[in-house]
Image (cartoon, rainbow, N blue to C red):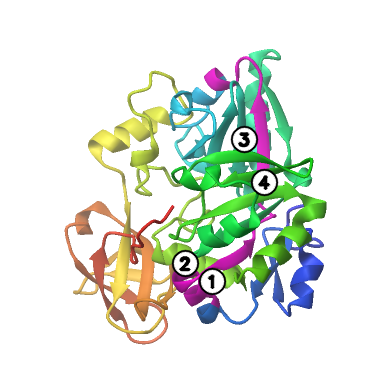
Amino acid sequence: MTSESATPLRTPLFQTHQRLGARMVPFAGWEMPLTFAGQVEEHRAVREAAGLFDVSHMGQILIMGRGAEAFLQELVPGNVAALEPGRSRYTQLCNESGGILDDLIMTRLGGEEFLAVVNAARRAVDLAAIRGRAEAHEGDVHVVDESPRWAMIAVQGPEALGILEKTLPGTAWRATPPFSFHVLDEGGSTLCISRTGYTGEAGAEILCPGEEAEDWWNRLLAEGAMPCGLAARDSLRLEAGYCLYGQDLDEETTPVEAGLAWSCAWKKPEHWPGREVHERQRSGGPPRRLVGLLSESRRPLRAGDAILTEDGEEAGHVTSGGYSPVLERGIALGYVRPPFLGGDRFQVAGRGKPVPVSKVRPPFVRRPGSN
């Protein structure tokens, strides 16, 4: 059940959020907290101290078997073979026409065992695509949906690692770089620490059994992390210049168009779905490119707004937009067609008078020590 028109699913922390007074909204088939204290306050807490997010709606897919590595090399553009045990990589799952079915984090747990963390709204699509291709591997690859087993909590911000160090068993995980993954034993229960996040800040994500989620959430709150909702998560990832599936990425958009060519392993010999399209766009140029736009005013930019040249000619459209609490200006991501990519000045037209904007290279806000 993933449709927002159906009864929303609830994470193990649903009642905890209600007790904290969260404003709950349907999102990707789930009932999730939008805000607790308010979007701007939560956003600033993550940039200045530490924020706490319930991301238990994300999917976890286990891929294992003696053919798992070879299978994944042909499934995603990233170089999975280069992953050492306990290391993670951002990549995508694409269709044969080059479009992105989902973007995800792939981790080698050890040997021929891998964990893919996927977007909640795309979990069913991802599972169908992965299982469909695994059928051709005659039992050498096994795909297991681990999502019902786990709750997932993200702690993000300049004080996040200090809070986690006070809360988690052991300290070896802290000395490792971002995109490291650790499995810890906490009183006989498995706890996973992933040094990843989607806010542009340092931090980690905790995977724990669902029945233990409230205890871990409360421990982290007690150490000073502020509960944060989807609204702050969106404005934080936009300041960091991170794409959001369903807005900046979809089945009609390629990694090259989205500025994600850096995540493709162009030198690996394996064919992944859509590679020919990606190679062609890489060498000859894509039909559009994702750019960052910085407004000269405080007025938020909005998804769907038209991107115009200074002369008023339509050049593209905004896919993600909003207000940056750090810069105190409107910011956006959007696609611009090649004839207009040489320009540095545009206008964004939505409701009201068009807003002058500058083309900039994301991130809009760059933070030291970020994941």
Q: CA distance from mark 4 to mark 1?
A: 21 Å
| Residue identified by numbered label 2 | 236
Query: Callout 3, which amino acid?
Result: Leu
- Going from N to C along the chain, the mark reached first, 2 or 3, is 3
Describe the element under mark 4 as helix, strand or loop.
strand
Magenta residue check for 257: no
Dot 4 alpha-carbon crowd within 10 angstroms: few under 14, some 14 to 19, many 20 or more? many
Which residue does the image show at 48% across and 43% down from the upper left? 179
Tell me the residue that label 1 is attached to.
232
Inter-mark Cα distance, 3 to 4 = 10 Å
CA gap, disc 4 to disc 2?
21 Å
- Mark 3 or 1, nearer chain start: 3
Q: Are marks 4 and 2 in contact (CB under 8 Å)?
A: no
Mark 2: secondary structure: helix
* Residue 340 visible in the picture: yes
**Earlier residue among tags 4 and 2:** 4
**Residue drawn 56% across the image and 40% down it:** 181
Specify few, some or many for label 1: CA neighbours under 10 Å numbering under 14, 14-19, or 20 or more. many
Percent from the top left, x then y, of residue 287?
31, 47
**Tag 3 residue:** 115
Residue type at mark 1 is: Ala
CB-based contact (under 8 Å), mark 3 and mark 4: no
Residue holding disc 4: 59
Q: Is residue 110 above or below residue 337?
A: above
How many numbered callouts? 4
